[in-house]
Image (cartoon, helix red, strand yellow):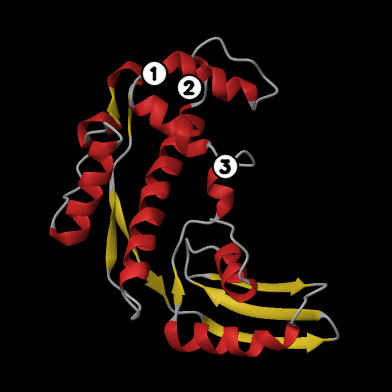
């Protein structure tokens, strides 16, 4: 149904700003970005995913080995769930890019679905056309999400652009802010923290 969080932000420079940020989340909702952990410590998981989709397997393997304790001989020797995670990061990167584009052009939140590129995705409507354009610039086709060489396929889907934040509350103590809130399944607490504290995490 969702996830509940209680998170303390310490050493806040302006804890009094929490009230306005929380009120905005209550009334406007939260942009449903994929959080930074989706992209790894090096923030390059989506780059590896792109290389896999382009079938540039040697360079993808080199990047994976650079961030791994185990050194793999080939992509075939890597667990498929791990390989798919890189492709999911690539899909997430373009979802975030589409949501960025929407937010820069519109003030009102958008609670409908944004397409996620993948095998079988229907790229209809303005956002679908925009996604197709982004993929073409990356030299990626929807058919590329079916990788026969690795016996692997990443299907497309969609995701709400904004989500409502349930049961959000806060408490200020000196320079700390204690937040409690509930998010729908699949939404990231790190994104809500970013909306409250306004660091550039994406």
Q: Is residue 192 left or right of residue 128?
A: right
Q: Residues within 10 Å of mark 1 (few under 14, many from 20)?
A: few
**Mark 3 highlights which residue?**
43
Which residue does the image show at 27% across and 38% down from the upper left? 137
Return the residue found at the far top: 73
Give the label on residue 2, or none.
none
Return the residue found at the far right: 174
Of the two numbered discs 1 and 3 on the same chain, state the one appearing first in sequence: 3
Distance Cα–Cα, label 2 vs label 1: 6 Å
Of the two numbered discs 3 and 2 on the same chain, state the one appearing first in sequence: 3
Q: Secondary structure at mark 2?
A: helix
Q: Are marks 2 and 1 in contact (CB under 8 Å)?
A: yes
Q: Position of residue 132 (x, y in %)?
A: 21, 45
**Mark 1 highlights which residue?**
56
Distance Cα–Cα, label 3 vs label 2: 15 Å
Which residue does the image show at 42% across and 48% down from the upper left? 93
Q: Secondary structure at mark 1?
A: loop
Q: How many numbered discs sit on the rendered protein? A: 3
**Mark 2 highlights which residue?**
60
Q: Quadrant of residue 149?
A: top left
Task: State whether residue 37 is above or below residue 162.
Answer: above
């Amino acid at each position: 149904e969702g996830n509940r969080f209680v998170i303390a932000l310490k050493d806040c420079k302006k804890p009094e700003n929490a009230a306005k940020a929380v009120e905005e989340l209550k009334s406007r909702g939260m942009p449903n970005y994929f959080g930074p952990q989706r992209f790894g410590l090096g923030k390059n998981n989506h780059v590896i995913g792109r290389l896999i989709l382009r079938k540039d397997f040697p360079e993808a393997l080199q990047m994976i080995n650079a961030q791994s304790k185990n050194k793999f001989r080939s992509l075939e020797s890597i667990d498929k769930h791990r390989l798919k995670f890189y492709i999911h990061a690539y899909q997430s990167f373009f979802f975030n890019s589409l949501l960025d584009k929407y937010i820069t052009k519109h003030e009102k939140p958008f609670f409908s679905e944004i397409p996620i590129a993948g095998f079988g995705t229907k790229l209809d409507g303005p956002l679908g056309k925009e996604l197709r354009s982004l993929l073409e610039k990356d030299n990626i086709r929807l058919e590329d999400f079916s990788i026969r060489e690795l016996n692997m396929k990443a299907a497309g889907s969609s995701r709400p652009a904004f989500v409502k934040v349930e049961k959000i509350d806060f408490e200020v103590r000196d320079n700390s802010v204690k937040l409690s809130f509930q998010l729908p399944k699949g939404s990231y607490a790190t994104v809500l923290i970013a909306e409250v504290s306004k660091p550039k995490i994406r």
